Image: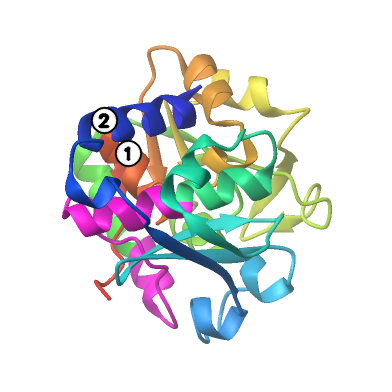
Amino acid sequence: MILRQAIQKLVTEFSGSPFFSGRVEIVARVLSAQEAIGNPEVYDFPLLKGKECIVEANFRGCLGHAFTDMYGGFEGMLREVFEMPGNNNYRRALQVAAINAVCRFLGEAKDTVHCRDEEPKECAKESVLWMKKEYPRVKKIAIVGFQPAFVDYFSKKYDLKVLDLDSDNIGKELYGQTILDGEKDFSEAIAWADLVLATGSTLVNGSIDKVLCLAKSNPVVFYGVTIAGVSWLMNLRRLCFAKER
């Protein structure tokens, strides 16, 4: 499992560092939609609908975010977070947020805090330009996770299949795309695509290993702040144009 491997690698490589010994506090709290994303105006992001939240870990003044639909706070030692079984979205969210905060502290991960206001739209524009440059031959993209700005901008340049787990979205036509069932239509959409563009939240909901397995030799690119630390630890391709905070 990618998340467990990332935790093991982080602990193995840095367990001898001073900050890994003794008592270390991590505080994870649930951010309100206003705190997390501000006022994006045009797009109806999941955060604004109240179905998902961002959990924020604070490690020695460095912040790390994780997107989740199963949320709650935590305060304790770093090793307690990493040793707990990652058997649900709540625990995985805590672990991912903690990894992001620690990697930010180490200087190995940037963009670990969610973008705000008009920045998601600007990120979508930059991401399309990045994709054209990095993967010029790609025509068909499977987007795993409904990110409205991404669907809007990528649909203007690519053939898309958009997968989501939110029953309120499945079957609806949004930004010119019929949103597919993230479980039933998953395998078919991944097999169809030249490239998979997946939300980093797949780390939290446990589907990241399935994404990587089914994509086979096709490239997989992850987006967003949630996967910031793990993408560095596991050498996964990630795009994120959030402004540093």
Q: Nearer the viewer, residue 40 or 113?
A: 113
Give SS at disc 1: helix
Image quadrant for the C terminus?
bottom left
- The amino acid type found where label 1 is placed reads Ser
Q: Position of residue 236 (x, y in %)?
A: 31, 32
Q: Is residue 171 above or below residue 13?
A: below
Q: Is 99 part of what is drawn in magenta?
A: yes
Q: Is residue 14 left or right of residue 234?
A: left
Q: Nearer the viewer, residue 5 or 197?
A: 5
Q: Nearer the viewer, residue 84 or 194?
A: 84
Q: Is 10 part of what is drawn in magenta?
A: no
Q: Position of residue 33 (x, y in %)?
A: 60, 79
- Residue at 72% over, 72% down: 49
Q: Is residue 156 visible?
A: no
Give SS at disc 2: loop
Residue indicated by mark 1: 231
- The amino acid type found where label 2 is placed reads Asn
Q: Is residue 183 left or right of residue 113?
A: right
Q: Nearer the viewer, residue 200 or 17?
A: 17
Q: Is residue 23 above or below residue 202?
A: below
- Residue at 39% over, 19% down: 218
Q: Is residue 33 visible?
A: yes
Residue indicated by mark 2: 235
In contact (CB < 8 Å): disc 1 and disc 2 = yes
* Neighbourhood count class around disc 1 (C-alpha, 10 Å): few under 14, some 14–19, many 20 upward: many
Marks 1 and 2, how far apart in space? Answer: 5 Å
* Neighbourhood count class around disc 2 (C-alpha, 10 Å): few under 14, some 14–19, many 20 upward: few
The region drawn magenta spans 97-124
Q: Position of residue 52 (x, y in %)?
A: 68, 63
- Residue at 61% over, 53% down: 146
Q: Is residue 132 above or below residue 112?
A: above
- Residue at 61% over, 35% down: 86
